[in-house]
Amino acid sequence: MIKDRVIAARDILGIHGLDALLFTDLYNIRYLSGFSGTDAALLLTATDAWFLTDSRYTTQAVTETGLPVRTHQLKSVGIANLLQELALKRVGFESDDISFAFYTELHSAAPDVEWLPVNETNRLRSRKDADELSCIAQAAEFNASAIEAILPVIVSGARERDIALALEIALRQQGGEEKGFDFIVASGERGALPHGVASERKIAVGELLTLDFGTRFRGYYSDETVTFAVGQVSDHLRRLHAIVLEAHDRAIAAVEPGRPLREIDAVARNYIAAQGYGDFFGHGLGHGVGLQVHEWPRLSPRAQGVAEVGMVFTVEPGIYLPDVAGVRIEDIVAVTDEGCRVLTRVPKSFTVLPN
Ligand code: ZN
Ligand code: ZN
């Protein structure tokens, strides 16, 4: 168990007057216990904790968590038996994680338990400790070395999907765990698709190319976007890049503890709007990154909350002109006492790749 994180999670018990918290979300379980397998439940009381899994993971769970491990054949029954033994009555569960079918099963296995939906651990995860920050920074280092390794492959005539594959291999060779998500490799007019995963399209001279990619290190993600020019591009495309870069720089400069997340989003959004492209930046400015590639918090015009020291999130403004081109520039920042630190390392200044 990871002590400081468990202490914070136990505060939730007091807030809701609970006897115990049942965790089923594997990311939250990894966060609290260190367990990296794919079947688990974790029961936390004010003084104790139990780990539940199936027999495939018994040894791994003992090693990784240091907790008493109970093995079950049917998870709902394993949980119900434990609750009954400990005479626990008011139990918080992660309603954002479990299916209605599993909830129904739990309910009938433990009919005397009062189940209360509690989903606050995702928010605890938004403020990273030093260990988590170093994992994300390491995953970001892999990004930088991988891009450097594949630059010779990014030439006119190359297919988007070949670039995506080269990037994936390079990330694995650096030490990345596995592909973080389906990489976006979008050239020419496909750049206007914010989620244009790599296609058969061949890149041509004079086009912009957007690469959105990342990997994992010890469970923690990197996520980064760079937009290159392949050969010389028109003044119009160059201007689009300059606007997005300025919006990105201004938003990063605005990050400081206590600043409403909505305001950070607005700094980039208002700048892009003032340049005449407000209708072409449709998504939120960023998202938290950690054990999940998209996690709490969100940065958007509707975002709640403020930047807090230790929070890690992306800053990724873009402009997407349908049937013409697109630009997105994305970095990960960690909020510090003074402002923020940029964890991603690939240079974002306007770069023309030789052709
Ligand atoms: Zn991304
Ligand atoms: Zn992102």
Image: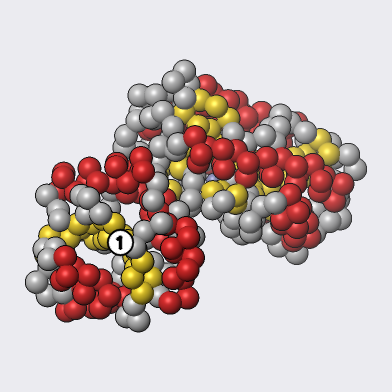
Q: Which colour scheme is used?
A: secondary structure
Q: Quadrant of residue 325?
A: top right
Q: Nearer the viewer, residue 314 or 73?
A: 73
| Residue bearing the label numbered 1 | 50
Name the residue furthest bottom.
73
* Residue depicted at 42% across the width and 57% down the height: 65
Q: Where is residue 240 in the image (x, y as percent from the top left)?
A: 65, 34
Element type where label 1 sits in the image: strand
Left-right relation of 8 to 17: right
Where 88 falls versus 242 (above or below)?
below
Q: Position of residue 225 (x, y in %)?
A: 63, 43
Kind of residue at disc 1? Trp
* Residue depicted at 71% across the width and 55% down the height: 172
Q: Which of 312 and 131 is in front in this view?
A: 131
Q: In which quarter of the image is residue 163?
A: bottom right
Q: Which quarter of the rendered picture does the C terminus lie within?
A: top right
Name the residue furthest top.
338
Whether residue 138 is visible: yes
* Residue depicted at 41% across the width and 28% down the height: 309
Left-right relation of 233 to 53: right
Whether residue 188 is visible: no
Q: In which quarter of the image is residue 161?
A: bottom right
Quadrant location of ligand 2? top right
* Residue depicted at 70% across the width and 36% down the height: 346
Where 186 falls versus 25 (above or below)?
above
Where 58 falls versus 275 (above or below)?
below
Q: Where is residue 283 in the image (x, y as percent from the top left)?
A: 48, 45
Q: Which of 95 and 65 is in front in this view?
A: 65
